[in-house]
Image: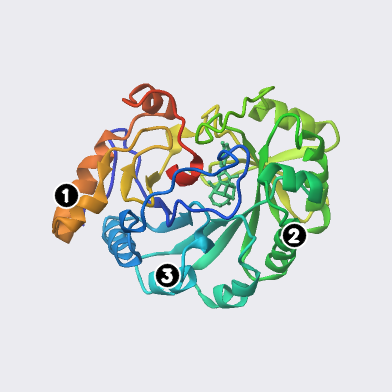
Amino acid sequence: MSNLIDSFGRQITYVRLAVTDRCNLRCQYCMPAQGIDIVPKQELLTFKEMYRLIRVLTELGVKKVRLTGGEPFVRKDFVGFLEMLSHNDLLDAINITTNGALISKHINTIEKLEKVKNINLSIDSLQREKFTKITRRDVFPEVYKTFELLEKSSLNLKLNVVVQAGFNTDEILDFVKLTEHKNVAIRFIEEMPFNGKGQREIQENWTYKKILEEIQTQFNVVKIKSEKSSTSQNFSIENHLGTVGIIPAFTRTICSDCNRIRITSTGTFKNCLFDDGVFNLRDFIRKGASNEDLKELFLSLVKQKPANGFIAEGNRKKGDVTESMSTIGG
Ligand code: SAM
Ligand code: SF4
């Protein structure tokens, strides 16, 4: 069986699939207050189409899928889709990124799905008022409840914190303190300046280096050996149950070990977060492409994967990245 190997010898084993472009929150760094222009429902991939695309990819060596969006739990019967995907015997892991506002009632069901292993919960502040300002929705109590339930569950939990100058940089140390008694991996993400033309100007650049320096003002961190393709540099702290990590999303120092591709909710294939989409899979399958056609296509598409995110950005025909992460599939 052929595997997906790009022209730099990187093997693709991970796909990020956005199951919707819709969201119940309006995070200021992700979209404007009025939301983004969502596409008509018939333009979204159906769950059946998603299942098929993932199945073909797993036959080419993909082992893991991350389901994201938009907010995955906004899509009707998303939990049913998790059950459906679990039937794919070639998949090792199904991971989910969520804002946590709609999931507390589903946690028991999800825990029973053997392949669902990792949940990334986005939570940018531990203070209700600030959380409301950032997400433009007053749902902190529900998200925090989800956090506590997930922490006690058998699922492996990571918290995503987008570091936003002037908003939550004063909470970096509070988040690190959480790891003392909670078995959770906190990952600070560099804010990227694209938010669906949301007019948010980033005042001060909180780079990987600056975030690390802030943590080191109070904690002695020790670098942990992470998986080669990990998106974060991870650290432990003596006597802390959890760990901390930093994702250099914008400074892009992780590209050489990238093992990922993306599929947006409308079926656009992306080799990189920063490219402008290289192929419309939805139209291809709706015109009758067979699984063999899809395989051939995937094998050739990954050969176009650029060496890194800067090159991908430079190759864009649509100019600078302005799309919301909700459209791209974060
Ligand atoms: N709605 C889900 C959530 O918020 O977790 C999944 C989709 S969201 C687009 C995925 C991740 O992208 C979240 O952790 C979010 O914080 C992050 N994200 C969105 N816009 C970003 C930006 N401009 N810079 C950095 N991270 C961003
Ligand atoms: Fe929605 Fe996630 Fe974007 Fe926030 S980051 S607006 S929760 S898609």
In the foreground, 76 or 53:
76
Label 3 or label 2, whichever comes before in sequence order: 3
Mark 3 lies on a secondary structure that is helix
Label 3 or label 1, whichever comes before in sequence order: 3
Query: Would residue 309 be found to the left or right of residue 244 on screen?
Result: left
- At 31% from the left and 58% from the top, the residue drawn is 42
As drawn, 313 above or below 107: above
User: What is the three-letter code of the residue carrying label 3?
Assistant: Phe
Q: How far apart are marks 1 and 2 (CA)?
A: 45 Å
Identify the residue position indicated by label 1 in the image: 296
The answer to whether one can see residue 155 in this image is: yes
In this view, the mark in front (3 or 1) = 3
How far from the left and from the top, in percent, is residue 174?
83, 44
Identify the residue position indicated by label 3 in the image: 81
Query: Would residue 329 be found to the left or right of residue 219 on screen?
Result: left
User: What is the three-letter code of the residue carrying label 1?
Assistant: Glu
Label 1 or label 2, whichever comes before in sequence order: 2
As drawn, 221 above or below 185: above
- At 28% from the left and 47% from the top, the residue drawn is 4
Query: Would residue 127 be found to the left or right of residue 51 on screen?
Result: right
Label 1 CB-ligand 1 distance < 8 A: no
- At 72% from the left and 29% from the top, the residue drawn is 165
Disc 3, disc 2: CB below 8 Å? no
**Quadrant housing the N terminus:** bottom left
As drawn, 174 above or below 211: below
Identify the residue position indicated by label 2 in the image: 144
Q: How far apart are marks 3 and 2 (CA)?
A: 25 Å
